[in-house]
Image: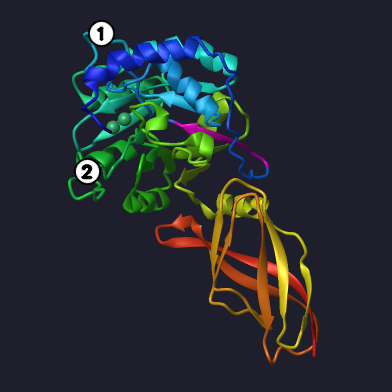
Amino acid sequence: MRRSGFAGTAKVLSILSIFIGSAFSQPRVRQPFRVPGVPGYVLLKCDFHMHTVFSDGNVWPTVRVDEAWAGGLDAIAITDHLEYAPHEKDVKRDNNRPYEIAAGDASSLGLLFIRGAEITSKMPPGHINAIFLQDANRLRTDDWRKSVDEAAAQGAFLFWNHPGWNGQQPDGVSRWYPEHTDLLEKGRMQGIEIVNEKEYYPQAHRWCLEKNLTMLANSDMHDPVETTYDEAAGDPRPMTWVLAKTADEAGIKEALLSRRTVCFWKGNLIGREEFLKPIFSGGFQVQKDTITIRGTEWASVPIFNDSDIDFHLSSNGRADGFSVPASLTCPANKVVLLSVQGQKDHGTGTRVVRIPYTVTNLWVAPDQGLAVEISIYCKFIK
Ligand SMILES: [Zn+2]
Ligand SMILES: [Zn+2]
């Protein structure tokens, strides 16, 4: 996104980065980020948009790999700008070098590493990322359409970056132009970033649902990761979670082309209901689903959140026979007690009570949380 600043410190930072990358006195550690999976798929945590000194970033390519591994990611793409290289006095202009420099490091760490580049045009169409490239330098042309055609010829997956970025849309509103229709119709745009760094674009989210496009969330980092995120302390970057059939580059590509992603951003998950539901039920575990309610007394249902993501639930406060809290937060890796109170007219006998809740930090559409039901076997007595 950003195309300015930090030029003066780039060289110092890159030299420092090389030093850090080669002179560890402490063993390197990786912060796992535990999230429930989706049956039938491998969930891969990915970031498909970031920069290095080969465009307007301020780190050496191997640092991107080391950061991603330490932050618990499974796959990344470095996507330096093709048309913009403010460090070129110091760093040779070559859009294949970031991949070539860092591929060995990625391989030794078991991180999947994808060759990419950012086609950096004014709006419309704005910036477009091309990943799974063979030769990024061949995309450096005098016309974004030629660059996109070349990327497509190389078998790239193409997505529209930060459609509401205020550098191109001063009011922050994402707008669809005829150029985007053209890209879509020619198979030259398969996804959109609905999250870029600190921003979420609800209109782009709607377009992905309406036009059946892949949803992506990426960091677009230019500076060292710790300047923006504290991943070791549980504050991860935005990520695209890819639901792959195989944990390799081909598996990621197939999943992206099949729209199987969930976007993680600031503790929220954004995606299609069919994927958010199993992720929720994999983490949200009712530990004891049988309770007895006598009259208007209280009873508790212990719920364990077996994941590193908090779940925030809201309801209208009522179920069949008892009242429930209107809001409930299930903190990551903790047990919370759901306290319910019998209603006067609940009757007697044992029945299954389904408590309807909305998970307010799992978004199936803009302003629409995931609807779930918690089922409880309840014995009602007078
Ligand atoms: Zn950009
Ligand atoms: Zn970028």
Mark 2 neighbour class, 10 Å CA radius: few under 14, some 14 to 19, many 20 or more: few
Q: Is residue 296 visible?
A: yes
Chain part drawn in magenta: 40-47
Mark 1, Cα crowd under 10 Å, few <14 / some 14-19 / many 20+, is: few
Q: State left or right for residue 171 relative to residue 154.
A: left
Give percent across and percent down for residue 370.
53, 60
Residue tagged 1:
90
In the picture of the structure, the residue carrying the numbered disc 2 is: 166
Q: Is residue 381 left or right of residue 317?
A: right
In the figure, 259 relative to 155: above or below?
below
Tell me how far mark 1 sits from mark 2, CA to CA. Answer: 30 Å
Q: The C terminus is located in which quarter?
A: bottom right
Residue drawn at the location 63% of the way across and 51% of the way down: 278
Q: What sort of colour scheme is used for the picture?
A: rainbow
Q: Marks 1 and 2: which is nearer the front?
A: 1
**Magenta stretch containing residue 46, yes or no?**
yes
- Give the amino acid type for the residue marked by disc 2 in the picture: Asn
User: In terms of image quarters, where does ligand 1 lie?
Assistant: top left
Is 293 included in the stretch rendered in magenta?
A: no
The residue lying at 39 percent from left, 35 percent from top is 219
Judge by depth and name the residue closer to the eye, 4 or 96.
4
For image coordinates 67% across by 76% down, the residue present is 340
Dot 2: element: loop
